[in-house]
Every structure is written in C-alpha cells, then in structure tokens.
Image: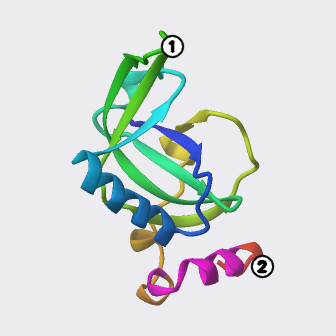
Amino acid sequence: MALHLLKLCVGTDSIADLEAWIEQSLRHRGEQAHTTRMVPKREADLLPDGSLYWVIKGQIACRQRLMAVRPFTDGGGVRRCHLVLEPRVRPVVPRPCRPFQGWRYLEHATAPLDLEAAAAGEVAAMPDTMRRELAELGLL
C-alpha cells in the first residue's frame, strides 16, 4: 500500500488557483516541483504510487501524484528537497484538516477518495467553493 504526503497549499484559495500556479511553473521549469526543507525519510514507501494531498482553506481538497523525491543542497548549504509532481490535479472528497507546519505522512487507508470515484457526476462538476461549503455543512 502506498504512503502519501499531506501539505498545506499556502497562498491559494481554490483548486483553480493551484492549477494556475502549476501552469505557470510548467512554463518556467518544464516540470512541477514543490520545494520543502525536509527530505522524507520514508521515500521508498512514497514511490511509485504515493501522492501529495493539498489542504486548501482548511480542507483536504485535491492531490497530485508524486513522481520523484530529489534531495539537494541550496546555495546556503541547507539540505532541501524537490517533490516532483504530476501536473494533473485530482479533486478528492473534501475533509476538514487543521493547520500544521511542514508536511505529514498520510496512510493510504485514511486518505480521501478521488471525487470522480466517490461522487456522482453532479458533485464532481460543482465549483470548488460550493463543494467546500456543502462539506462544511455536513451535506457531502
């Protein structure tokens, strides 16, 4: 079973904001990589089937498949890590999540399901903000 990472998506208000940021990153770098200060010690459990689940506005909202973990040392001599991600964003069934620093491991058994697989087409087609509000009201 795959292991996943959970991370706050700081500075975005919606999945659409994240997708716009990814598009810009792809134009500049040719790939999407998220830089972290820590290197996951359980890399072997993350690859090849793990994902990075994004928390947006207090809810686990979407995920991106993790393609590679690339440790490096920056210009100041600090070890860092690029999490290379598949550019496709997959919305998941929204779930509340409290803020935290850095990233957390997320076991496959407790990870939210992809919205496409879990919900009827109408729910998957809803705007991100509407899904979030319905989930907060306990209606999803």
Q: Nearer the viewer, residue 118 or 9?
A: 9
Which quadrant: the C terminus?
A: bottom right
Q: In the figure, 4 relative to 39: above or below?
A: below
Q: Nearer the viewer, residue 16 or 135?
A: 16
Where is residue 59? Give x, y as percent. Answer: 66, 60
Badge 2 density bin: few <14, some 14–19, many ≥20, Cα 10 Å? few
In the shown orientation, is residue 117 left or right of residue 29? Answer: right
Please state which amino acid type lies under the numbered disc 1: Val
Q: Which mark is residue 137?
A: 2
Stretch of the chain drawn in magenta: 124-135
Q: In the figure, 61 relative to 132: above or below?
A: above
Where is residue 119? Give x, y as percent. Answer: 48, 77
The extreme top residue here reads: 77
Residue 101, quarter of picture = top right
Count of all numbered marks drawn on residues in the image: 2
Where is residue 134? Give x, y as percent. Answer: 69, 81
- Residue in the picture at 26% in, 45% down: 29
Residue at mark 1: 78
Please state which amino acid type lies under the numbered disc 2: Leu
Where is residue 10? Give x, y as percent. Answer: 62, 51
Q: In the figure, 68 relative to 119: above or below?
A: above
Disc 1 element:
loop
Residue 107 covered by magenta stretch: no
Q: Nearer the viewer, mark 2 or mark 1?
A: 1
Disc 2 element:
loop
- Residue in the picture at 74% in, 46% down: 99
Q: Nearer the viewer, residue 16 or 116?
A: 16
Q: Nearer the viewer, residue 118 or 98?
A: 98
State whether the magenta stretch is mostly helix, strand or loop: helix
Comes first in the chain, label 2 or label 1:
1
- Residue in the picture at 76% in, 49% down: 98
